[in-house]
Image (cartoon, grey):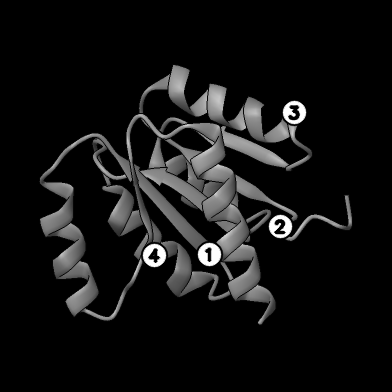
Amino acid sequence: MSSQPFSCIFVVDDEHAIASTLAAILRMNGFPAMFFTCPLEALNAARSEAPDLLISDVTMPDLSGIDLAIQMTAQYPKCKVLLFSGEAATMDLLQTTSEQGHNFPLLLKPAYPAEIFAEIGKLAEYSAA
């Protein structure tokens, strides 16, 4: 496990099937992943164990994935973020977020495991540099 670049991964999606399946795929590939269907629960859980990688859907009730990412990285600056979305309007939200100084990579749904692992690899390289 020590060879893994991330020791705690949070997967957040309001669709239980997506969150639980992605976390299971990550765990099957040696990544320590927990899933949440509520972004506020993920923020609360981070108080006990802060993630070093957040993988989150963008469009969720209560708190968007973008707002979750901003709050998570503000509280835990070493936390890397990977967002995913099935909505085209997300690009406009990310542009606004980027103008505010937050640059989060985005995968479009459906995001296949190979794409997710490739992005995780990029984030791991970036954090190691």
Q: In the shown orientation, is residue 103 left or right of residue 112?
A: left
Which callout, 2 or 4, points to the residue nearer the camera? Answer: 2
Which callout, 3 or 1, points to the residue nearer the camera? Answer: 3
In the displayed structure, 24 sits above or below 92; it is: above
Looking at the rendered structure, the kind of residue marked 2 is: Phe
Q: Position of residue 107 (x, y in %)?
A: 36, 46
Report the label total. Answer: 4
Q: Calculate the distance from the C-alpha at mark 2 to the C-alpha at mark 4.
A: 19 Å
Looking at the rendered structure, the kind of residue marked 4 is: Gln
**Front residue of 74 and 94:** 94
Q: First in sequence, mark 3 or 1: give its number.
A: 3
Q: Are marks 1 and 2 in contact (CB under 8 Å)?
A: yes
Q: First in sequence, mark 3 or 4: give its number.
A: 3
Residue linked to disc 4 = 71
Quadrant that contains the C terminus: bottom right
Q: Calculate the distance from the C-alpha at mark 4 to the C-alpha at mark 1.
A: 12 Å
Which callout, 4 or 1, points to the residue nearer the camera? Answer: 1
Q: First in sequence, mark 1 or 2: give its number.
A: 2
Residue linked to disc 1 = 80
- Outermost residue toward the top? 17
Q: Position of residue 101 (x, y in %)?
A: 28, 81
Q: Which mark is residue 6?
A: 2
User: Considering the numbered disc 4 on the image, is that residue within a helix, a strand or a loop?
Assistant: helix
In the displayed structure, 107 sits above or below 3; it is: above
Which callout, 3 or 4, points to the residue nearer the camera? Answer: 3
Q: Which mark is residue 13?
A: none
